[in-house]
Amino acid sequence: MRFKGRTAGWLALGLTTLLAAWWNIPTRAQVEAVDKVGQIAPKMDARQMLQRELPLLGTEMMWTSPEWLPVGKPQVYLAQGIPFLRVMAEEEEWNDSDKPVARTDRVVDSVYQPQADPHEEVKPEQVPGLGQFRLWLPAGQKVPLVGIYNTHTSETYRLTDKTDKVPGEKGGVFAAASALAEELSSRYGIGVVQSQAIHDENWLLHNPYANSAVTARQMLEKYPDLQLLIDIHRDAEVPRENSVVKIQGREAARIMLVVGTNSRGNHPSWQKNLAFAQQLAKQIEQQYPGLVRKVLTKPGRYNQHLHPRAVLIEIGSTSNSTAEAEYTARLLAKMVADVVKK
């Protein structure tokens, strides 16, 4: 049984109210709280109250952007620690995932995705392979024009690996990224630089987006001619019937392009990224109808503030195989090459 967006919100609000009553969490109207020994505790906001009673929500990972406090959206808090509510929070994305056209008409505010904190220090020892790049350069080309990396490097495909993630390793999304790089280089003559870093090995302690932001900056500094910056992911829990399509007689993993906005951080040019993603999605759909699930705008920057042609591409879902994702990546190479050559 699934619940649509508003239903999920009201149900989550009800659960929050019950939790507050059960644990006697103070309301906003209460400016002071008495602790267990009768002493007066400091004033607490909604986030602090929830962290006190739900320790999972006190982890640093959940609050990398301290200014982000979605008052009035308790389902966002609870979805972090209660998987059932995570499913409900993602329901709105499922509603139209079987439509083969790119969606650009709305902003979906679903489960919080921590974004890179400009004040967070990233130490190389935290990120295996940080700063290590593989160059895919065709004969006669000296510099790469496309940069590819994986923020969630350990994401993989259930049909192949029987699991959703391979912690500390390079998952199926890395294989898809490699397939895209190889196809661009060998078939279309486009040079590529590909990150070898595992950005999410210590994701409970260190924000993967802060880690991959370092990689993106290193790429752009070392290779200033880069025209595109692509972060390859896979989606989660999309039903298989909505996550696969036959292209030229073979099953391919459908894709979703994700574009961040300026709602959680400074990103004044985000509409340029959106325009680029829309154009790329249009070209893909013209060449391979049904391959694009949608274009999705979401809160957060996803490192796209670093380049006007930076885009996050979800290739398939947990319900796909690595082979299907690799096939899609090779199909995608044609449109990426067309963009570069224009």
Image: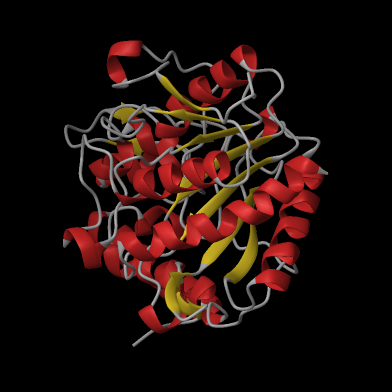
Q: Quick check: can you spot residue 30?
A: no
Rendered location of residue 117, percent (x, y): 52, 25
> With respect to residue 275, does 265 lie above or below?
above
Which quadrant: the N terminus?
bottom left
Q: Could you tell me which residue is drawn at 53 percent across and 71 percent down?
A: 93
Rendered location of residue 146, percent (x, y): 62, 34
Q: Could you tell me which residue is drawn at 58 percent across and 57 percent down?
A: 332
Q: How many marks?
A: 0
Q: Could you tell me which residue is drawn at 36 percent across and 27 percent down?
A: 197
Q: Residue 49's image quarter?
A: top left
Q: Residue 311's image quarter?
A: top right
Q: Is residue 138 left or right of residue 335?
A: left
Q: Quick check: can you spot residue 221?
A: yes
> With respect to residue 68, does 118 lie above or below?
above
Rendered location of residue 272, percent (x, y): 81, 44
Q: Is residue 2 left or right of residue 262?
A: left
**Which of 151/44 is in front?**
151
**Which of 73/60 is in front?**
60
> With respect to residue 277, does 197 lie above or below?
above
